[in-house]
Amino acid sequence: MKRSALHAIQRQVMWNRLISVVEEQAQTLVRTAFGPPTREAGDLSAGVFLPNGDMVAQAVTGTPGHVNSMAEAVRQFLAAIPAAAMRAGDVYVTNDPWKGTGHLNDFTVVTPAFHRKRLVALFACTVHVVDIGGIGFGPDGHQVYHEGLYVPIMRLADRGSMNESLLAIVRANVREPIQVEGDLYALAACNEIGCRRLSAMLDEYGLRDIDELGADIIERSRRAMLAAIAAWPAGTYRNTLDTDGYERTVRLEARLTIAKSGIDIDFTGTSGVSAYGINVPKSYTDAYTSFGVRCIIGANIPNNAGSLSVVRVHAPEGSILNAPFPLAVAARSIIGQMLPDVVFGCLAQARPESVPAEGASSLWNVRLAGGQAFKAIDAAEVAGKTRFNIVSFNTGGTGARPGKDGLSVTSFPSGIRNVSMEILESISPVLFWRKEYRTDSGGAGRWRGGLGQVMEFENGEDAPMVLGATFDRIDNPARGTSGGLGGAPGRVRIASGRELSGKGRQVVPRGERLIVETPGGGGIGEPHARARELVRRDLDDGLISESAACALYGWTA
């Protein structure tokens, strides 16, 4: 065998080993985390970086909103603490939305990896903690100061000793101190495992560091991404998408240009910042915009500094997609998770046969709190009641795909898993009365959009509870393409009939049940072109009603 062929095989083996290292890093975080968002839903990221801050590899486990913004966050850590000042046993932390992953509930931790007393890499990871103090999670704040504890880049551990002062401050400022402190220890453990496994890998392969391997992976990924882009029609494509916003509709406007040098996305024309916490820091905009591109172009190419470098994003400062400090940003995912749909609308103009329709996109997480004072709640109603603060991770349907129906009740683009109702019922008095597919919610088409779901909740202690709503696609549901119809809009209401807003904290009165209906995805193609056997299957499965089959698909028994 020629040396070049053997060398290529060795590189591939080492690359696979590096992926296993970061995946074990992520699994350590899942298994040691205290908070359900990480332990059950997988709301996290993990990866390994060269000492200069270039991301080499990421774990498959995790969400793009974390991992792609974390790629820039590591550079922020290096700007604050140069590599030369790092020591073995140091661990650094921040939840700065503009230097981390977009809001205060996300802690990012960076750990220098040393091998034979030389700095050889940086490991980084992120989790979403269940509470960070302030007014509570949601879009109701007007400045980041309202939204909770703000930790600048600092040491979480100094040469192996945890920063007890920082931990004491965290415990004193959050509603779930055991969970949040436990998650910080889990973050440190996650990176420590990465450091150990990397050192073992270097010993096994007789390497001093991963500089050459990492640079080769990054360059190969960059070239592969450019080749994938070159296969697409060059040109400029525009798309506009309206979201519900908070005080007014928010317009997302994009101009996407495909050229030999890469892809540029310009959000000039997008709505300005909001007075509420739905604003998006630029790092989060970059994360989900680049992810939207990568879903369609170069999906099988490793996600690292090389492949990300050829997708360039511009969002004017002062727009809702580049919100400056100190604006409120807690619910930045509401807007940010719509960005892949905006990108898809641009790419569909170049190759409509390759791009799905719009979906529910933004998560419909049901945040419920009880046993505590709130406006419109009499203190006597919660006296002696269980204090709780839970998040049920939920979503609607994805858009129909080229040649396939959309996926029902599937978290795209976030990739977050649901937290089982049994776990939530075990840690709170909340009862789940119903959780089922929402019939007729998928947009009709030759290829049907994915369905949303219907959920019904009640406080089992016969006391009021507070809903922290961060919902969208109520006034602006997902659109279909090529003659396909739009998905059903979302809906939030009290069982007795009162409609609730999609944004902000609202009271669910004692003895009442909360009903949440998540939106569906858009369809592709004329509904009458749908195969008869597929319509029959949907009828048999209860995904569509007979009246909808007749009216939308021309069904006759």
Image (tube, rainbow, N blue to C red):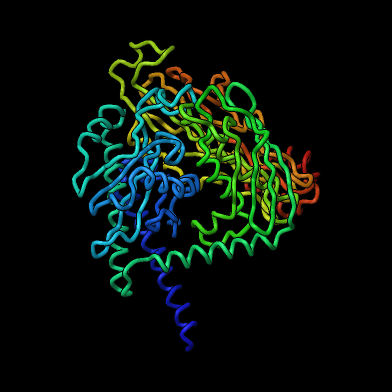
Question: Splitting the image into 4 quarters, where does residue 273 fall?
Answer: top right
Q: Is residue 422 visible?
A: no
Residue 409 relative to residue 429: left or right: right
| Quarter location, residue 118 | bottom left
User: Residue at coordinates 64% horizontally, 39% vertically from top-left?
Assistant: 267
Q: Position of residue 458 (x, y in %)?
A: 44, 26
Using the image as rendered, state which of residue 99 and residue 397 is in the foreground.
Answer: 99
Horizontal arrangement in the rendering, residue 534 relative to residue 3 (left or right): right
Q: How many marks?
A: 0
The residue closer to the viewer here, 314 or 110, is 314
Residue 552 quadrant: top right
Percent coordinates x, y for residue 46 in the rendering: 39, 52
Towards the viewer: 119 or 486 = 119
Residue 295 vertical position relative to residue 451 in the rendered view, above or below: below
At x 63% / y 42%, what residue is drawn?
A: 359
What residue is shown at x 35% (from left), y 58% (from top)? 121
Q: Position of residue 379 (x, y in %)?
A: 34, 11
What residue appears at the point 32 percent right and 54 percent down from the top-left corner?
28
Asked if residue 210 shows in the view, the reply is: yes
- Look at the picture and state if 61 lies above or below 491: below
Residue 173 lies, with reference to residue 154, above or below; the image says: above
Residue 479 rendering spot, x and y as whole percentages: 70, 39
Q: Is residue 496 left or right of residue 88?
A: right
